[in-house]
Image (cartoon, grey):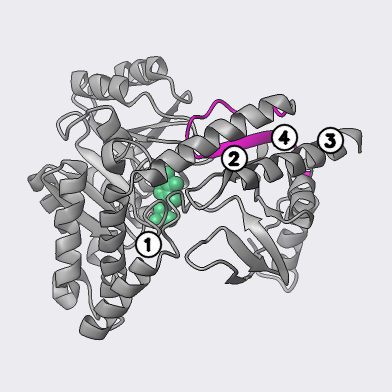
Amino acid sequence: MRRSPQAAQDALLALEAGQLRRRRRVVQGYTRPGLSTHVLVEGRQCLNFCSNDYLGLARDPRLAEAMARAAAESGSGSGAAHLVTGHGQEHHALEEELAAFTGREAALLFSTGYMANVGVISALCGHHDVVLQDRLNHASLLDGARLAGAKLQRYAHLSAVDAARCLQAAGGRDTLLATDGVFSMDGDVAPVAELAALARQHEAWLLVDDAHGLGVLGPRGAGLVAELGLDEDDVPLLVGTLGKALGSFGAFVAGPADLIDLLMQRARSYVYTTALPPPVAAATRAALRIACAEDWRRDQWQTLVAAFRAGAAERGIRLADSATPIQPVVVGDAAVALRASQRLFDAGFWVAAIRPPTVPAGTSRLRITLTAGHTVAEVEALLDALAGALQAEATA
Ligand SMILES: *Cc1c(COP(=O)(O)O)cnc(C)c1O
């Protein structure tokens, strides 16, 4: 972009014209104790149906208490990177608990999932390597491959057959295969068992980013990879994020101890950054205990997904094929998605319109998420409002 007085404004106007300019709504507060579902936003009370707080833990008082206790003991900030003096008791214990939770030898904490993916891929891959990815992978996985300077190749969404074709074509070059576990904007699930078999056959690394499966799927919420019964030999690089179902903040990569140690040496987004605040690690530990113990939270989102899908079918609302808490309604056009989202907001339901470049052009959508904090009655009310908004668009 050339420097000129109007350059930024021109770029913003271009976004505006394509219905792609984004704006933020300020969450002013919450209106039910312990719940993140009932929010006060722009002076209005509404039901939040687009957060990633799948287990309803983000406002659980037990996380806040753990945070306060750790802050009193260890302070608000870590003061340094992990490899200097920032690696405290809470971080260390959390890493051990995450390794146990996912059935891996070791785990390494990162400040965010974005940083974990960028760090892991660029630590293991270079210019001579191939990074093979599902076409709809999260931006952080794509950016990791770009930062590594590796040859980035994308296979058709969910297609192990196409991935196999690409692995053949890589012709023996060192390869890392990366996929989202549960796809963040579609709610569908990668064929991880097939990909693991392929990766083994071609001696490629396999990275599964289970940001939306951890806490949500599998025995005691151990994630998609645990649900499929895949160990660290099948999936050597398991990335999880802590800001979604676990209601906290941060991320980790788990796997064989030597591999994790190597990442600790080499991942620049680990080495050259301040460790998470100890109270955040303490809150995550509390969340992990609750997520393991309280199966009713997973039962609840499953009940709601069933009710939502049945109710949508009754009302003639077409849904994507998803069995997870992510239930997108694809409307296609960005302007339509924006208007439908606004209609829902006016009716008291907060559902974000997801537009390019987050999703491919022509697949703009309402990304509805259901959480353990919602009730069946609230889902029914959402369905009525949704049917109304879509009907209004169809006749507009
Ligand atoms: C949210 C998300 C991330 C990024 O995690 P943050 O902790 O929010 O940075 C990475 N991968 C996937 C698939 C995600 O959905």
Q: Which residue is drawn at the image coordinates 23% and 40% (left, top)? A: 237
State how far apart marks 4 and 3 are (Cα).
12 Å
Q: Nearer the viewer, residue 126 or 154?
A: 154
User: Would you place residue 209 above or below residue 71 in this image?
Assistant: above
Specify start and end residues of the magenta stretch as a single range: 317-335
From the image, which quarter does the C terminus lie in?
A: top right
Name the residue beneath numbered marker 3: 391
The tag earlier along the polypeptide, 2 or 3, is 2
Name the residue beneath numbered marker 1: 248
Name the residue beneath numbered marker 4: 331
Q: Nearer the viewer, residue 95 or 82?
A: 95
User: What kind of element bears circle 3?
Assistant: helix
Distance from mark 1 CB to nearest ligand 1 atom below 8 Å: no
Amino acid type indicated by mark 4 = Val
Distance from mark 4 CB to nearest ligand 1 atom below 8 Å: no
Q: How many marks?
A: 4
Q: Which of 91 and 54 is in front in this view?
A: 54
From the image, which quarter does the N terminus lie in?
A: bottom right
Residue contact between numbered discs 4 and 1, judged by CB atoms under 8 Å:
no
The tag earlier along the polypeptide, 4 or 1, is 1
| Residue 218 drawn in magenta | no
Amino acid type indicated by mark 2 = Val
Q: Which residue is drawn at the image coordinates 31% and 37% (left, top)? A: 208
**Dot 2: within a 10 Å radius of its alpha carbon, few (fewer than 14), some, or many (20 or more) residues?**
some
User: What kind of element bears circle 2?
Assistant: loop
